[in-house]
Image (spheres, rainbow, N blue to C red):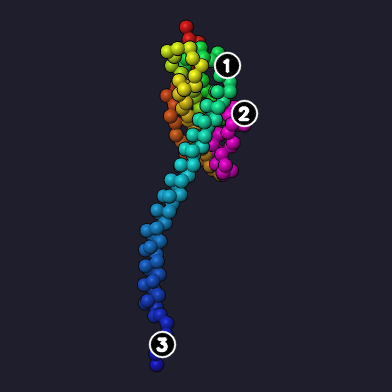
Amino acid sequence: MKRKGFTLVELLAVIVIMGIVLVLIVPSINGFRNQNKKKGYELYAESAVRAAKLYVEDRKTSLTAYPEWQGCVSIPYDTLIKADLLKPYAEKRYNCSALEVRVYRTKPETNKADTKTLTFKYSLTCYDNKDNTKVFEKSTLDGGSCNAQPIS
C-alpha cells in the first residue's frame, strides 16, 4: 500500500533548513532596521540645521548685532520648536530634545550681511523614553562654549 505525505525525517530536514535560513536573514534585517533608525536621526539633525538657517535669516539684525560679529551663537532645540521651524522628533518613544545648533562666523572679509559666510554645526543625542538609555549621539561641533563677540 502506497502512503502519500512526508516522513518525519523529511519534515525535520525542512524545519532545519528553514531555521538555518532564518539565522542568516534575521541579523541582516536587524542591521537594516538599525541603519534606517540612524539615518532618521541624522536627517532630523539636518532638518534642525535648515531650521537654524531660517531662524538666523529671519533674525539676523537682532542676532548679536549681525553682521558685526564673530565667534559662535548657540540656537537651542526649544528655540527652534517655539519658532515653529522644527517639529519634535516623530517617534514618541524617543526623546531627541538634546539638540543644539551652533552658528560659527570667523572675521569676515567685508561687512556683508550674507548668511553664506556662516557655518552651521550640530550636536544631537536621543534617548529611549522607556529606560532613558542613549540610542543615538552625534556631534559636529568644535567643542567648548559658544560666545559671540563684536568685531573690533
Q: Is residue 63 visible?
A: yes
Q: Check if residue 86 falls in the magenta segment.
A: yes
Between label 1 and label 3, give the one nearer the viewer.
Answer: 1
- Please name the amino acid that badge 3 sits on: Arg
- Which residue, as the protein is rendered here, is positioned at the far top? 152
Q: Which range of residues does the magenta coloring cover?
A: 79-97
Residue 115 screen position, x and y as percent: 49, 21
**Residue indicated by mark 1:** 61
**Residue indicated by mark 2:** 83
**Residue indicated by mark 3:** 3
On screen, residue 145 above or below 51: above
- Please name the amino acid that badge 1 sits on: Thr
| Point 46% across, 18% down: residue | 105
Q: Check if residue 83 falls in the magenta segment.
A: yes
Distance, label 2 to label 1, CA atoms, is 16 Å
Between label 2 and label 1, give the one nearer the viewer.
Answer: 1
Residue 78 screen position, x and y as percent: 59, 29
Distance, label 3 to label 2, CA atoms, is 75 Å
**CA neighbours of label 2 inside 10 A, class few (<14), some (14 to 19), many (20+):** few
Residue 92 screen position, x and y as percent: 59, 43
| Point 55% across, 30% down: residue | 51
- For numbered disc 3, what is the local secondary structure? loop
- For numbered disc 1, what is the local secondary structure? loop
Distance, label 1 to label 3, CA atoms, is 88 Å
In which quarter of the view is residue 15 placed?
bottom left
- Please name the amino acid that badge 2 sits on: Ala
- For numbered disc 2, what is the local secondary structure? loop
